[in-house]
Amino acid sequence: KLDAERGILALGKRASVVRATKVISCKSMMIAKWLTCLTSRQEINPLSDFVFCPISLRFMVTSLGTLAMHRPPGLFNLAGASALSYVDFVHLLAAAMGVDNSLIASKNALELNIPFFYPRTLGCLDMAATTATLGVTPQLVSSVIKDLLDEYLAESSAANHHYAPSSNHHS
């Protein structure tokens, strides 16, 4: 990846490179499973020792649109405002959905002998240059969750499911 980025940036004023932290949507396999379990009030077992810095697909697309409109050259990072464990994210997601946290029973990947093909802790990227150049700021976790639930509601409505967000969904 680094060699490709260098090659692109060598093009000068005609080139931009975008790096992003974990982009999620309601169709992401892990997120879809969590949403399905929470919606159907089933126990869920997110990992406590995996950390990520999520951004929503909506944020990614909107940010890329902003970049395309301005066409500045350089390296731009897109990231969430904070890193958190999968279990912490699921607790926030469940709260936004109005689902009881007692359904969440975290697991530890090391204890479950889950192999690690990438670092378990994916930190956030520095967005200072992106913010200064494009005015795009890191996405808050609450915004990631709102985007996920908006997308899930639209998908559920299209498929005639009956998910209804709780009153604190828009917080």
Image (cartoon, rainbow, N blue to C red):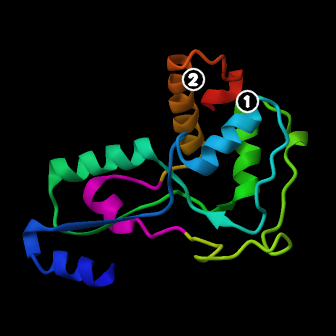
Residue 135's label in the rendered image is none
Q: Quadrant of the C terminus?
A: top right
Mark 2 residue element: helix
Where residue 31 sits: x, y (%)?
Answer: 62, 46
Mark 1 residue element: helix
Point 80% across, 32% down: residue: 99
Which span is picked out in magenta? 124-138
Say how many tags the image has: 2
Q: Is residue 21 above or below residue 35?
A: below
Where residue 49 sits: x, y (%)?
Answer: 76, 69
Q: Which of the marked residues, 1 or 2, is nearer the chain's N terminus?
A: 1
Where residue 50 sits: x, y (%)?
Answer: 70, 67
Q: In the rendered structure, which amino acid carries the disc numbered 1? A: Thr
**Residues at badges 1 and 2 in contact (C-beta under 8 Å)?**
yes
How many neighbours does mark 1 have within 10 angstroms: few (below 14), some (14-19), or many (20 or more)? some
Where residue 82 sits: x, y (%)?
Answer: 59, 60
Q: Is residue 107 above or below residue 152?
A: below
Point 52% across, 67% down: residue: 124
Q: Quadrant of the N terminus?
A: bottom left
Q: Is residue 109 left or right of residue 18?
A: right
Residue 39's label in the rendered image is 1
Q: Is residue 126 magenta?
A: yes
Q: Is residue 48 left or right of residue 10?
A: right
Residue 156's label in the rendered image is 2
Looking at the image, the residue that sits furthest to the right is 102
Q: Cα distance, mark 1 to mark 2?
A: 11 Å
Q: Nearer the viewer, residue 137 or 3?
A: 3
Q: In the rendered structure, which amino acid carries the disc numbered 2? A: Ser
Point 47% across, 69% down: residue: 125
Q: Is residue 28 magenta?
A: no
Among the 4 quarters of the image, the one containing residue 34: top right
How many neighbours does mark 2 have within 10 angstroms: few (below 14), some (14-19), or many (20 or more)? some
